[in-house]
Image (cartoon, rainbow, N blue to C red):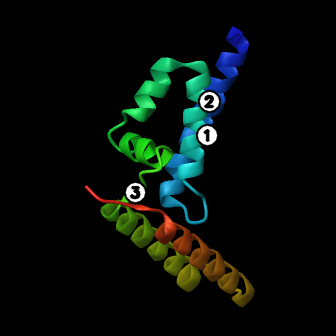
Amino acid sequence: MRKLGKKILIVFGTFFLGVGVIGIFVPLLPTTPFLLLSAACYARSSKRLYDWLMSNRYFGRHLKDYMGGKGISLKLKFFALSLFLMTIAYSVIFIIDNNFWRMTLLLIGAGVSIHILAIKTKHK
């Protein structure tokens, strides 16, 4: 791949990584798909950045397990679901004052929760 193409992929990979990290704290912004996009961009542009991402102490192991079909640990499921549901609840109670949007957020929250629970649980 040409140098410009690799540089563009590095920029996109870094952007997706940033959005994925923000998604840890912002409800309805998914983390895993953006981290997977980041890994794909880095895999095609920079072995060093890809290796760094996949060996990152916070999400490298989780990415490898998810990509390998091994699932995620019960501890990670609990953490993700707890943080997600607390953020949804806070938003519904304190931020949103329109019942239509409250219900929409609750329905999306239910869907995301079902997805998290449906992911295979990795046993040590």
Looking at the rendered structure, the kind of residue marked 1 is Leu
Q: Position of residue 66 (x, y in %)?
A: 47, 49
Tell me the distance, in whole angstroms, between the alpha carbons under discs 2 and 1: 6 Å
Report the residue that reaches farthest toward the top.
Answer: 3
Instruction: Examine the image and state in which quarter residue 2 appears.
Output: top right
Q: What SS does tag 2 mark?
A: helix
Residue at point 61%, 74% (across, down): 111
Looking at the rendered structure, the kind of residue marked 3 is Ile
The C terminus appears in which quarter of the rendering? bottom left
Q: Are marks 3 and 2 in contact (CB under 8 Å)?
A: no
Residue hosting label 1: 37
Q: Which mark is residue 41?
A: 2
Query: 89 above or below 124?
Result: below
Q: Is residue 96 visible?
A: no
Q: Which mark is residue 72?
A: 3
User: Mark 3, residues whose alpha carbon is within 10 Å: few (<14), some, or many (≥20)?
Assistant: many
User: Mark 1, residues whose alpha carbon is within 10 Å: few (<14), some, or many (≥20)?
Assistant: some
Q: Position of residue 99 (x, y in %)?
A: 70, 90
